[in-house]
Image: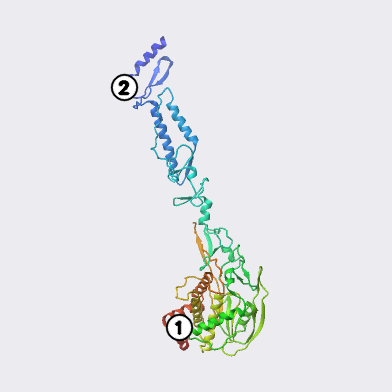
Amino acid sequence: MKWLSKIFKGGAGSSRGVSTGEEQPQFIGDENMVWRAPFRSLDDRPRASKEKDELDRAIALSLTEDLKRPNGYRWRTETDDDLARSLRDSFNSAPYPSYAPREYYPRGYRTCAGCKREIGYGNYLGCMGSFFHPECFRCHACGYPITEHEFSLSGRDTYHKSCFKELTHPKCEVCHQFIPTNGVGLIEYRCHPFWSQKYCPSHEHDYTSRCCSCERLESVNTTYYSLGDGRSLCLECMESAIMDTGDCQPLYHAIRDYYEGMNMRIDQQIPMLLVERQALNEAIEGEKHGFHHMPETRGLCLSEEQTVTSILKRPRMERRGLVGIRTQPQKLIRRCEVTAILVLYGLPRLLTGAILAHELMHGWLRLNDYRNLRPEVEEGICQVLSHMWLESEVMPTSRNNIPSSSTASTSSSSSTWSYGPSTSSYRPPSTPASSTSSSSKKGGKSSVENKLGEFFMHQIAHDASPAYGGGYRSAMAAVNKYGLRRTLDHIRYTGTFPE
């Protein structure tokens, strides 16, 4: 019993620790053992209640940390719920009294943002400050659930990364692939200023065919017709293309009637021939005077006597292009100031008519003794007549405004073609639909042919060259202000446009 008395003896010195309220070491007899008096909590609740509250608080903090992650999400699994339930059950087991666990969150706290129903036990997703059933977290584009660990977000709408790219990344309308990025990470593409055809810059240098009429590039799923002289024609332009001199005669006489209706009758019977590209270039070389707008001449008002090869019979359309064209040489005798009018074959009706209207104005000026005009004056007034004829065909009841940007041109004492597409830089996220209805040179004009007519007017109005573009704009301003007749009279006496 000696050891027991030593314990009681040691206990007598413990009053200092209690009086100070500190944990003081207590020495137990000669064994030199140390025992610290236990700290007494002021919370007298049962241990089970305190530990349950601590567990609930820990789970709440874990959920809060998940929701604070920016644009992140975390799957909560059934294992997490089972573990929480088992921990709670362990604290509710004997020898402590059992009780029904109190739900920490109010009812409806975890409500699915997709289906708006309450989320019970099982997998769920926390994302963007909301909860979702796995099957309710869906792509805004395709409607299928998003199961990947990465997704794209636009506003509050979620997308599969592939769906978001399909929606926002532009595709080339030539190769139908996503337009690649350049060296600085921007999506750089070319875009036609009228048709809005977007395409990879590489297609300007990889020999992709371009329609010689409307300038659109050939797509991989279409086939352009080769005219056999380096030119190609798209299917829409081919529908109304004029292929030989016989086919062109009715159009030529209709335009002469148009001039007569404006009191600008052309008394001389000027021959008109449809010719190949090579024959037209040879006729230009034989012409001693005249202003020729390069790089492509499509019409010529001829003043010299020449022998020209004209197209007698239209070619056949075969799979590889146009074949079997028949030509004949024709001696052109000069009986007046104008020997003949030559127009390039294979162009749509409205473009052919615009060239004829331009060249007939050259003929009218020469036959009415308008001499030694500066290029911007003569070509400008000829472009005005070409534009006016197109307007009468495309918009016969009213004169409307013309679209505002292009880099191509139709003109001439030599009618011409040039092209300069715009360059754009695009950051994700960013297509024009071209008309597919058919056009025909017989009967009424279709919407496709009218659209082509608007494009040819667009070309004339926004040609960048000083003679054809600048001359047209100055001439049209004078005609709009003073009328065509007074403008022509002023040109006759002064060689300039009225101010």
Pointer 1 local density, CA inside 10 Å: few below 14, some 14–19, many at least 20: some
Label 2 secondary element: helix
Label 1 secondary element: helix
Of residues 2 and 411, which is closer to you in this image? 411
Of residues 428 and 250, which is closer to you in this image? 250
Residue type, numbered disc 2 = Ser
The residue where tag 1 is placed is 484
Quadrant showing the C terminus: bottom left
Q: Give the side of residue 88 with respect to residue 205, left or right.
A: left
Residue type, numbered disc 1 = Leu
Colouring mode (rainbow / by chain / secondary structure / one colour): rainbow
Pointer 2 local density, CA inside 10 Å: few below 14, some 14–19, many at least 20: few
Residue 82: where, in percent of width, then height? 48, 33
Q: Which residue is painted at 38% across and 28% down in the image?
A: 49
Image disc number at residue 19? 2
Q: Which quadrant of the view contains residue 198? A: bottom right
The answer to whether residue 463 is seen in the rendering is no
> Count of labels shown?
2
Q: Earlier in the sequence, mark 2 or mark 1?
A: 2
Of residues 231 and 426, which is closer to you in this image? 231
Q: Which residue is painted at 58% across and 77% down in the image?
A: 298
Marks 2 and 1 close (CB-CB < 8 Å): no
Estimate the spatial distance between the alpha carbons at disc 2 and disc 1, rounded to whole Å: 118 Å
Quadrant showing the N terminus: top left
Residue that extends furthest to the front in the rendered view of this protein: 443
Q: Which quadrant of the view contains residue 14? A: top left
Q: Which residue is painted at 66% across and 76% down in the image?
A: 325
Residue 279: where, in percent of width, then height? 64, 80
Residue 211: where, in percent of width, then height? 58, 70
The answer to whether residue 283 is seen in the rendering is yes
Decide: is 399 above or below 5: below
Decide: is 14 above or below 286: above
